[in-house]
Amino acid sequence: MPGLIRGIARTAVIAGTATAVSNRVSRRQAGRWSRQAQEQEYYDQQQEPAYEPEPAPAAPAPDPMSVKLEQLKQLSDLKAQGLLSDAEVEVQKAKILGN
């Protein structure tokens, strides 16, 4: 019987030691991860962009003459399709050209 009790006691000591070591390792690892997360958060907060991206340049204003030419082409296309009469084309043409 004394051998049995000694074996049980020995097993209990070994299991307790293993549990303590395992818990300590887990706490240390959790502490490391926590510190790394804090350091990364601090680093991210400290980082500023190296430069401010410049806004995209505004598209150049279209040439008024090219706009008028495009409108006149559309008018001639509509006339060719038979959607506008000669009189309607002349009215629209006068508006486009500003006469």
Image (spheres, grey):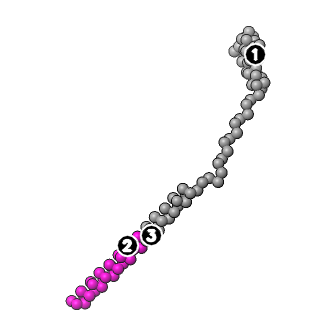
Give the amino acid at mark 1. Gly
Give the residue furthest to the front: 46
Give residue 50's mark.
Answer: none
Q: Are marks 2 and 1 in contact (CB under 8 Å)?
A: no
Give the amino acid at mark 3. Gln
Q: Position of residue 86 (x, y in %)?
A: 75, 10
Task: Classify 72 as above or below 27.
Answer: above
Residue closer to the observer: 45 or 56: 45
Q: Residue at position x 73%, y 21% from top?
A: 71
Alpha carbons under labels 3 and 2: distance apart: 10 Å
Q: Which residue is mark 3?
A: 29
Between discs 2 and 1, the one toward the N terminus: 2
Quadrant location of the C terminus? Answer: top right
Residue 93 shows in the view = no
Secondary-structure class at tag 3: helix
Secondary-structure class at tag 2: helix
Give the amino acid at mark 2. Asn
Q: Which residues are magenta?
A: 1-27
Between discs 3 and 2, the one toward the N terminus: 2
Residue closer to the observer: 42 or 75: 42
Check disc 3: other Cα within 10 Å, few if <14, some if 14-19, many if 20+.
few
Q: Position of residue 32 (x, y in %)?
A: 47, 68
Q: Residue at position x 74%, y 17% from top?
A: 96
Q: Residue at position x 71%, y 35% from top?
A: 59
Alpha carbons under labels 2 and 1: distance apart: 88 Å
Residue closer to the observer: 78 or 52: 52
